[in-house]
Image (tube, coloured by chain):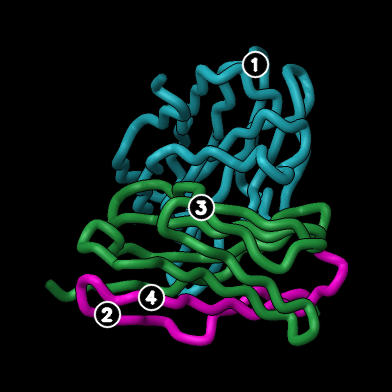
Chain colours: A green, B cyan
Amino acid sequence: GESVGLHLPTLSVQEGDNSIINCAYSNSASDYFIWYKQESGKGPQFIIDIRSNMDKRQGQRVTVLLNKTVKHLSLQIAATQPGDSAVYFCAENQGKLIFGQGTELSVKP
Amino acid sequence: NAGVTQTPKFQVLKTGQSMTLQCAQDMNHEYMSWYRQDPGMGLRLIHYSVGAGITDQGEVPNGYNVSRSTTEDFPLRLLSAAPSQTSVYFCASSYSRTASSYNSPLHFGNGTRLTVT
């Protein structure tokens, strides 16, 4: 069935290291994917999106990789900072948005 | 820009009470929607609107009503609150007339935390 999931519920990284947050999806018909960041007590904030006909897209300190062969999406954050601590979740568009549950990223100073 | 504004931030209701969660956006977005967020679950769509005067049901519409009399406002009404409606509610809008499209993502408010006792 339809699902968007995350491999790890929590991720702890050292400040300055790179972070990789993963997401698995099951519907190959999804035409694009989105990553959101949600800080405690706030609403989700758009980070980056990628079309299904792309493999990679880069933003400021973030890169999203899409592997359609294994239906896997990842978000890479370079030089992770304390301000990056939040829950990150992906969503896929199948005509409607399906949201994953999220991975909590904790950055150790 | 204020973006998407939700009020109140917190609310406690007794079972059976009714209330309205307010949502306003100042981005002239056509699409507006309400989601609920519960522990262990992804955001779930309650109701949405693709423009003034048009509303439709999402995934979990029971117990909620909406209306869209203006482009800016999209209130969510709880008719008779139940403990199962304890949740965090998010309003979101998009320039696109669909939920979200490439380079036209959903913009979320900061949520209303509702507890029903």
Q: Residue at x 27, y 80 (%)?
A: A13
Q: Which residue is mark 1?
A: B71
Q: Which residue is mark 2?
A: A13
Question: Toward the viewer: B108 or A77?
Answer: A77
Crowding near the residue tagged with mark 2, few <14, some 14–19, many ≥20 C-alpha atoms within 10 Å: some
Three-letter amino acid code of the residue under disc 4: Ser
Three-letter amino acid code of the residue under disc 1: Thr
Crowding near the residue tagged with mark 3, few <14, some 14–19, many ≥20 C-alpha atoms within 10 Å: few
Question: Toward the viewer: B37 or A67?
Answer: A67
Q: Dot 3: what SS?
A: loop
Query: Which residue sits furthest right?
Result: A29
Q: Which residue is mark 4?
A: A19
From the viewer's perspective, tell me whether residue A65 is left or right of residue A22.
right
Gap in Å between the C-alphas at discs 4 and 2? 7 Å
Looking at the image, do the residues carrying marks 3 and 1 touch, with CB atoms under 8 Å apart? no
For marks 3 and 2 on the same chain, the one whose residue lies earlier in the sequence: 2
Q: Is residue A14 magenta?
A: yes
Q: Which residue is mark 3?
A: A59
Q: Residue at x 68, y 57 (%)?
A: A50
